[in-house]
Image (tube, grey):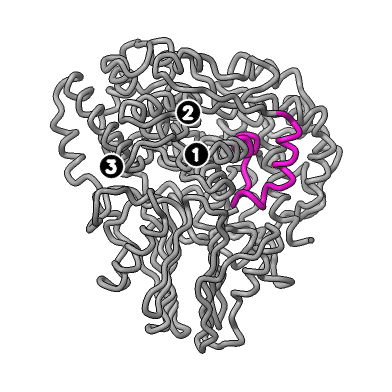
Amino acid sequence: MNVVFGSAAATSTGSTGPGIAGAVSHLFGEQPRTIISHAGPPSQDLGAFTDGGAIVGHAESDGAALVYIGAITHPVDGWIGDGSPIDDPFATARFLLDRYAARGPDFMAGVNGQYAVAVVDRNRRATLLFTDPWGGRSWFVAEDGDGIAFSSHLLSLARSRGTSLRVDRSLEDFFLIHGFYPFGRTPYAGIRALAPGAVLEWREGRREARQLPPGEPWPGVADAVAALRTEDEAVEALYEAMVRATREQLPSRPERVAVLLGGFDSALVASLIRHLGHEVETYSFHYENAGYNQPHTDTLARHLGTRHHWVQIDRQMVEKGLREFSRTFNQPTNWPNYVIQTARICERIRADGIRHCYSGDGCDAVFLGYPGTYLRARVFDALPRVPASLHRLLVSVAARPLVERTLGHPYRVALSMLRGLGRSHPARGYLSFRIMDEVTLRQLRREAPPQAEKSIDQLVAELSSPFASLPTLRLAYQGKAAVSPNRNKLIGSSDLSGLTILAPYMHAGLKKFALSLPEDLLRPSDKTRSSVTGKYILMKMAERKGLLPASVIYQPKMAAVDGPIDEWYAGPLRSTLMELMRGLPFDFDADYVDRLLDLKASETVFKRYVMTDKVISHAASLLATYAAFTGAVRR
């Protein structure tokens, strides 16, 4: 496991550094390395646990030390030499520390990638924390009157708080309904994640916070997109952008790299990397039920001359991952099988001697994929807002616990649509996906609900208001990104394995390029071969440039989260789920949860004829992974 941690306190007795180091040691069974420890006052500690992978770099010089976790990528303003920042994390750390010495606290401006950077400067008696402006990495921070403690790993920081650790339930209803914590909040009181682009400086007991401007990795990209006049011009420009983004994330010398292979998105990444001269090996989930296995892997391997690996996925792997969930990942999710399985594949990739891994993550969000998100956005856009009094009446009539128990997920989806009709733009289009409902929570908890900090409607309004100017489709995809498990998956898998895991579609330059494209280049009004999946111009580019066979480009969408998890929950993993939920911070109705795990006829029909993915046990998964974090308080 790869973890970075540290602390600073105004007095030598206030240091919480040994607490975090002890928590890391206890969780992972090895002693982390302390890069710098200064008794003070002020006391300052900075350390890291690394397994020798490619994602933790550190350097020391003239009373200052720097540690980062993640991946620094091109372009980097002022980079010296022909190499890539991902070649050697320690050389990159030395470059950053020299940059700090020359430029001072603003030295991270113009640095791209997915990173969390910490600097301890004994001469200035300062501790500084930085997160990348694009939200790829963050720090978890706990502050009190005397000091600050921070870590890249949530549970390590939580465990270091000892008996003072408490569960924060003030956002519990929002979390259980929408599936994520907003505004950097976590399940723990007093522990928050820094926002993207945050700069936090703690100096002699004083705290200063500011934002790092996101910068322009590709200056003028939006204007260049606006100047495109024809589809042919768009294809050429997109090809050049894809090649550039991929090249800037690759090692400087040809070497073996891995690609997490799902469908078209990741296959295109594999093709581009292969064309740029690197040896590519692809990896996919393999289930006993072949209906969940990714098709066309052999076709792609023949086309590119690559080697494909199947990694066996079974219920024992998922069970182990659920039991260790909070040790590997930093937030609960309703898609735990997906993130657990990705982490295990990454362990296999590292064992195969590969240091750098690539994925298709982020493609659907910027190129308007996700068929379910697209359909919900169209429905909400077409339906009028229901007057408040009528809406309250409709909800009161529809919200029936017995019906919810009988029909399960399809009923909760219908209630979600009905509740959305009472919201106005942009709130109704931003978070259209719900996991649980107020009816669910009333049956689940056998006690009074916790005191809510704000109502769910207030929170959704606050979250959506910055995106009020976006068109309907872009708004829906922005909301989808908030609930997506991809960031949680990539960070946890990278930290566990020590691999750099990068996605060209998440490159800041390419992302801005794609977001600047007109919607009719992504989902034309005319019927096309990509009408269901979206991403029209991307698929057209892959076809015209001969990057992939048509069978790979236009294959039916298979959701990456698909797997037999519903059947496992209903059968062999039922007792495990019930056991894990004992860590929940409230007394729950065991009969209701048991019913939640049953396979219902209505859900089987809904999966077969309505859903785009084939996993329906979102509520049970969210409860189990929530309990993985809150149970740490009881322990």
User: Residue 601 placed where, x, y %?
Assistant: 75, 18
Image height of 405 relative to 334, above or below: above
Mark 1, secondary structure of its residue: loop
Cα separation between marks 2 and 3? 26 Å
User: Residue 614 placed where, x, y %?
Assistant: 62, 22
Nearer to the camera, 474 or 28 = 28
- Of circles 2 and 3, which is in front? 2
Tell me which amino acid carries mark 3: Gly
In the rendered structure, does residue 333 fall within the stretch colored magenta? yes
Mark 3 — residue?
509
Q: Would residue 30 be found to the left or right of residue 247 on screen?
A: right
Label number found at residue 354: 1
Nearer to the camera, 307 or 315 = 307
Cα separation between marks 2 and 1? 9 Å
Cα separation between marks 1 and 3? 26 Å
Which residue lies at the image location 42% right of the left edge and 62% below the top edge? 117
Asked if the residues shown at circle 2 and circle 1 are in contact, with their CB atoms under 8 angstroms apart, the answer is: yes
Mark 2, secondary structure of its residue: strand
Q: Would residue 13 be found to the left or right of residue 72 on screen?
A: right
Among numbered discs 2 and 3, the one appearing first in the sequence: 2
Q: Badge 3 local density, few (<14 within 10 Å), some, or many (20+)?
A: many
Instruction: Using the rendered view, name the quadrant where residue 57 is placed.
Output: bottom left
Tell me which amino acid carries mark 1: Ile
| Tally of marks | 3
Q: Would residue 452 be found to the left or right of residue 401 on screen?
A: left
Q: Which residues are magenta?
A: 314-341
Mark 2 — residue?
281
